[in-house]
Image (cartoon, rainbow, N blue to C red):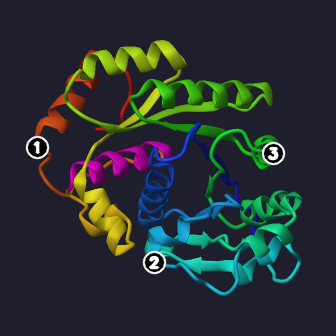
Amino acid sequence: MSIMTSETCLVLSGKGGVGKTTILSNVATSIAMMGKKTAIIDADLAMANLGLAFGLQDMPITLHEVLAGKASISEAIYDGPGGLKVLLCGDTIAGFQDADPAGLVEVIDYFKSRTEFIFIDAPVGVNEDIFLMLPYVDYVILVVTPDMLSMADALKMKIIAESFGCRIKGIVLNRVETMDFDEIMTEVKNTLKLDILSVIPNDLKIREAAMKMVPLVTYIPESPASIAMTKLAANIARVEYKPTIKEVGWFQRLIGKYRVKGIENYGPN
């Protein structure tokens, strides 16, 4: 097998409920659909839920079994949309107790020679497993919502990542409304002092796709959140974003305004 140069991203959030897994599953799916060899790993050993994003819940072999020495890595990999490789994690207490987190390093290495992009869905908040993985990833992306609790917790995660010498690529700002947009952007930038990679609108279609257990980018690609996440994926994969429809509406106009003003890069045109 030829050696591939993979890019490994650990996706963090300081608190739960900010949409980290939703964004990660959609971005990884988009990159796979762009023809890139892509893998996504659910490394939340205690509270895994990535399988729900793909309708792959209750699979018989998961990362729990791999880390317990009961199965090989290849046995726990399932096919997602666009050829995406999905390494699920179980959700049982017994599986969690049997799993040895030290094996996460071997799991990451397994994909490094087989993919171009690796995305790791990390546990929420400060966790020893994150400390274990940080030295083995290329960069971190923080998912944040526009509220003080989320930003305060994200700041803690930023400090932890930087203490390991890990590069932080930037922030994905999720569930954004039109109200007080300028104030939110200023507050996030001043608090976290990081690039804002993407702004994801508060889109009700996200919940609809979640109920059907499919990524939004495959379910309703023309929705505002789909467009934002596909642009983010193109940015990460360094490919040209090619819209399939005419982008209209308040969100596209608003982001266009900020791109023109040069405040941040929210994805390629």
* Label 1 crowd bin: few (<14), some (14–19), many (20+), radius 10 Å: few
Q: Which corner quadrant of the image does residue 5 belong to?
A: bottom right
Identify the residue under disc 1: 248
Mark 3 or mark 1, earlier in chain: 3
Picture residue at 83% right of the left edge, 47% below the top: 132
Which residue bears the numbered disc 2?
55
Q: Is residue 156 left or right of residue 175?
A: right
Q: Residues within 10 Å of mark 3 (few under 14, many from 20)?
A: few
Residue 106 picture quarter: bottom right
48 left or right of 148 in image? right
Q: Which mark is residue 88?
A: none
Residue type for callout 1: Val
> Is residue 260 on the magenta stretch?
no
Query: Can residue 255 be seen?
Result: yes
Q: Which residue is mark 3?
A: 128
The amino acid sitting under disc 2 is: Gly
Gap between marks 2 and 1 measured at Cα: 31 Å
Q: Earlier in the sequence, mark 2 or mark 3?
A: 2
Q: Is residue 233 magenta?
A: yes
Magenta segment range? 223-237
Secondary structure at numbered mark 2: loop
Is disc 1 placed on a helix, strand or loop? loop
